[in-house]
Structures are given as structure tokens and as C-alpha cells.
Amino acid sequence: MKKFVALVLALAMVLTAASALADLVICQNKVEITAQMEAYAKLYEEKTGVPVKVITGGGSSDYNTVLKSEMASGREPDIWVIEGPSGYELWKDKIADQAGAEWTQYTDAAYMDGDKVVGFPVAVEGYGLAYNKSILDKAGIDPATLTNYDAYAAAFEKLDSMKAELGLDMVVSMVAGTTTGMTWVTGLHNFNVYLTVGNERNDTTYIDQVLEGKVDPERFHQYCQYVALIFKYSDPDMLLNGTQDSQLAAFANGKAAFYHQGNWMDPSLVALNPDFEIAYAPHAFLKEDTDGILVNPPSWYVVNENGNKDEAIAYLNYLATSEDGANYMVNEAAMVPAFTNVTLAPATPLSKSVMEWNAAGKTYDWQQYKLPDGFGMGTLGAIYELFASGAIDVDAFEAMMIEAIAGLAK
Amino acid sequence: MSSKVKRKLTEFLFLLPTLLAFVLVIIIPFILGIYYSFTDWQGTGAVSKMVGFENYAAIFQDAGFLHSFLVTLLFTVLNIITVNVVAFVISLLVTSEIRGRNLYRAGFFVPNLIGGIVLGLVWQFIFSNILPSIGASLGWAGLSKSLISNKDTVMFTMVTVNTWQYAGYIMLIYVASIQGISKSVMEAAEVDGARYWTRVLKIQVPLMANAFTISLFLTLTNSFKMYDVNVALTNGGPISMFMNKPVQASELLALNIYQTAFKYNNMAQGQAKAVIFFVVLTIFSIIQVSWNKSKEVEA
């Protein structure tokens, strides 16, 4: 027992010593890039002489526990990660304004609070309808024309009629099942298409309406027709029983022409060795043309007002503007940087496509996370699944969605 | 200090650690839970205001909760029947003269050692992938679709999995009870010319009444509180219609409460549901135990 206590004490001393040595302490949540981030921190120390210590919390809930205990430890991290409004609200009092920092001029994805620039976008993630270029070529469909509802309706119908000769099982690989826990694809990501497509980034017209229990009737009607179109050309069994893996496998094996997922699926996609070209087409659900995919940072670095603020901002500037930083973000950590000055292209297909859309400035915002907890995945997800199962028709779907949204008015 | 008081004090001191643990982890959270059910607490931060019976009133207009309640009752009834019938039959089997009965005993009990989450995921794979592919290759229309994603058959899958897991455990209780019946009683009946099923139904079953009390109580509470298999096997899905609202066809009460509290972050409402859940389960258990107790006989 005594030995054990001594060991714990010694360990604690070593740990304190280690954190006391570091000039910058970063608390971050991406377990999968821990090694890359630590290597980059070492490189940064070699270049600038500023020691950096990286603390990683695994998974999102664990991360918050780790962060809270770091905050309580008396050596608060200088940089940490927030994942959206709830994280920001929690730590608001400690978060520094970085307005005027060099990195801010190369991105429009910073986390803003009014005029304050508070969050450095860790990366961007995006989704649209990923397509199999060789199948589209064989069917004589130019993906560049897929910018409105009618173009999609015609393309889906053509592909559906050529299923046998193209070797397709389904036109769109789409999932909507509660059982397999995939309702975030429908209730959050697909629903966000209604909220933001065609709008300027930061335009909150439709999310504000939804939170007041209202929808724009004409736009919502068109959106429901688009959902009906996707479901009609999906595989009914995949819709209800498809998992993230089976949804991906259908697309990667050339059994589906389109794939409703984001670039976070890249590592799994590459592992399946697809032998065709892949890129994103927009979720163009309106009769009018809309040309852009849905892109947003999943998390932001924030700087501690009471810590080594200047060193921390210098670190972030170096990350965004140096070649070392670009190399780390793109090649080492396999992320899509949110910065327009970074010209390195990712090697994986979905991320590469997101980067191209982002560089072209053709992106729409993510606002689904502003929905109340559980509403998108639970309440709306249930209605999408009901529709996917064929129990209700598109008019009933529209009516039930409107009714569910009206319930938010309270 | 009189010796009587001293004795009482000693008793209390010995009881104290257990009592302390019980109060800390059961009584205090229970009282806090009841308190939260009258507030608008969201799970973090402080309670902003008391709302009286608002949470309780809202529950009775919540189609999802009412549906979960009915589904839980249905699941409980089906599950009590299948678990006990299966457990009783296999307990007769493993107490008979059959060869390898010890192996069977162990075999039937093993599923109970596997965690509900693992079990749920394994069976989800069986129902969603293996059975449909067997059905497709044999050309049976009934099997070619996943039984889990069909709202009419999903309850069957849950009862199957729970029976598979739990019957072995209940079997042990029946086995112990059967072995406790004196051989002479059974032999006397045999000499009197009673056939096998007569002996089982007229002699064994009445003498095992206390085992039935325990087993029915365990299966009742276990089915009512079913959570882990529910989450891993069906996650509450698929979706069906109830009172013109979309509801989760296989979402049992415990899962409904969890979703309310943690998915919708409506902690106070979840607490109110949990209080109702507690009251209903207590009433059902008391009725069941007192009914079963009245059937117990001594031999």
C-alpha cells in the first residue's frame, strides 16, 4: 500500500512538473489525431522555442470531463476546444476575443459572438450528395447540371431505368432507421438542407422561423418533395435497416450512384478501395438553381483570456499561415482546413471535394444544431422513418412535419 | 448506561455503514428525484422555478409515453408467460434422468452471463442480417425482411431475446425448488398410479408455489424495467402511429424515460415519468406477490 501511495505521489509530481514546463497547454478532443498533434507541437517548439503540451480527452463526453478537471486543476489550458453554442456558453467568461489576429483574415468560419472573434475553426466538414463519377458518365449525366429539383428528378429516373446495365441495386444510398441509430442523417443533416440551402452563411431566417414553430410553406413544400424523391430512389430495406457501414458499402462497391454522407466517412471509404472517381453534388432541392454543399467547422479552438494569451494566438497564427501548419492539418491529421490561404489538397476523395467547394466559396451553413436537444434526431427523425417505411404519403409527411415544428412554439 | 440501551447502540453502530450507503445512494436520490419532478430543471445549472404538477399533466398528453406504457404492459405479460413456461419446462428436463443434464443446466444458464448490450447487438445481427439472408435463399417471404424493422413483429424479437437470456436464470430457481420436494411424496404419488403430468401438475406445481412467487416477481420487475436489450436490439424502433402521432413501436418505459431525460434534455419531465413508473411498478408487484402468497401451501 505504502509503495502504491508513493508511486501515485511520484507520478503526480512528474505530471505537475511536465505541465509546469510547458508554456502552452492545449486541451483537445480528437483522439484519432493525438499522435499527429503532439508531433506538430514538438515541431512548433523546435521552430519557436515555445514548449507546448497537448492534453487529449477521448470522445465528446469524456473530453468535457477532462476539460472540466483541467480547468479545476489550477493550471488552466491556454487553448481548448468548443463544439458549439453549449460549450461556448459554458466557458464564455474565460474565452478571449481574438479579433485582429492574423489568421482571422483567411477564413469566414470563425466562431463569432457579435463582433468578437472567439473561435479558430479546427477544420471544416461538409456533406452533399456524393456521386460515383463513372456511373454518371455511363448514364450520360453531367454532375454540374445537378443544381435543381428537376435535374435530380430526371437524373434519378434515368439511373433507375438503367439499373441493370449499370449494376446498381439502388440509385441513392440513404438511411433513416431509428433501430440502427441513423436518424441524425435525416432529422439533422437532411433537415438542415431546408434551413440553409440558397441562403448566405449566418442567415438565420428559416431556423428562426422553425424555432417559433413556423415554416415557409412554399419552400417547405418543395423540400418535402425532395425528401420524397430521395426516398423513392433509395432501397427500402437500406432506409430502415441500413447501418453506417452498409450504407457506405453499397456506395463504395458501386451498387449505388449517390451517397448521402459527409467527408468524415473518408477513412472508411478509402479502406474499401473504391475504383471510381468521387465528388459532391449539391443538395439542390428547389426549383431554382442552388449550387453549394453544406460546410461547417465541427469545433473551434478558443483562447484563455487569463492564460498565455499572446503565445496562444501566435500558435494559432502559425497553424493557419505556415507551411508546417498546412502540412500538419492536411497531410498529417487528414482534415480540411478552413483557411483560404492553404493550397495543399487532401488525398482522400470526399475531403478533396469539400475543399474544392469551400475554396470556390460555394457553401451553405449548418444550423441544425440550433434545434432543441433531441428534436431533430428524435421527433423529426421518427417522421422521416415513418415516411421511409411507406406508412404515410408525402402529404401526410409534410403535415406531420409542420405539426411537429409547430410544437416548438411553446 | 443501561445494558439495553448499550445493546441498541451497538446494533445501530453495526447497521450504520449499510444504512449510510442505503440513504446516500437510494433514499436521497429518490427524494431529490421527486423534488425535481415538480421543477423545470433541464439537467444542468440550478433549478429556476417550481412548476407544480405541470410535468405530470404533460405526461398524460404525451402519446409517446402512453404508447410506451401500453407496450411495456404487453411486453411484460408476454415475457412473464414465455420466460416462466420455458424455464419451467427446461427445469423439468434438467432434473429428469436425461443424460448430460448437468451440461444442459450450465448451457441454459450461460446466456444470462452475457451482458444485455452485447446480447442485443448479436441478436440484432441475427434478426436483421442472418435470418433475412436465410429467408431470401429459401424464398420465404416472411423471413426475407428484418423482423426488427417491422412494427408488428418487433415485440416478438424482444420477447425471444429476453426469454433466451433470462429463462436460464429462472430455471435455477425452479430446479432448486424441484430438488427440495421430498422424494417420498413423488414416489407415493407414483405408487398411487398418478401419471407423469398428473404428478407434475398436482404435486410438484403446488409444492413449488413459493418458487413461482419469486420467479413471477423477478420476471415482472425485470420485464417492466427492461432497458439494455431494448436499447441494443431495437433502440425503440421502428416508428408506428399511435393517437395520430409517430411513436417508437418498441420503446419500453425505461427507454422512454431515458430519452426524455438525456436525449431531449428534459430532466424534470423524465423524473416525473420515473415517479409514475415507480408507483405503477410497486402497485403491480404488491398485487402479484400477495396473490401468489395466497396460493402457497406447505407439504
Image (tube, coloured by chain):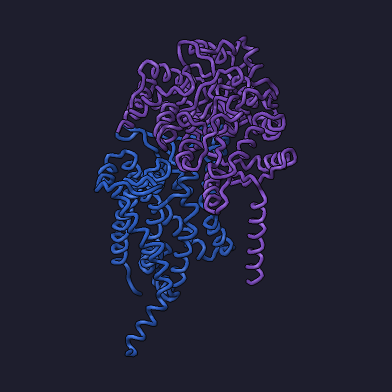
Chain colours: A purple, B blue
Q: Quadrant of residue B98?
A: bottom right
Q: Quadrant of residue A141?
A: top right
Specify whether A350 is left or right of A191.
Answer: right
Specify whether A117 is left or right of A106.
Answer: left
**Image position, residue A326 (x, y; %):** 69, 30
Vertical side of B22 occupied by A239: above or below: above
Q: Residue at x 55, y 35 (%)?
A: A299
Q: Residue at x 58, y 40 (%)?
A: A309
Quadrant of the frame with the N terminus of chain B: bottom left
- The residue lying toward the viewer, choosing from A383 and A349, is A349
**Image position, residue B203 (x, y; %):** 38, 68
Q: Is residue B197 shown to the viewer in this render?
A: yes
Specify whether B161 is left or right of A30.
Answer: left
**The furthest residue to the right:** A46
**Image position, residue A251 (x, y; %):** 61, 25
Number of numbered discs: 0
- The residue lying toward the viewer, choosing from A224 and A301, is A301
- The residue lying toward the viewer, choosing from B65 and B74, is B65
- The residue lying toward the viewer, choosing from A243 and A114, is A114
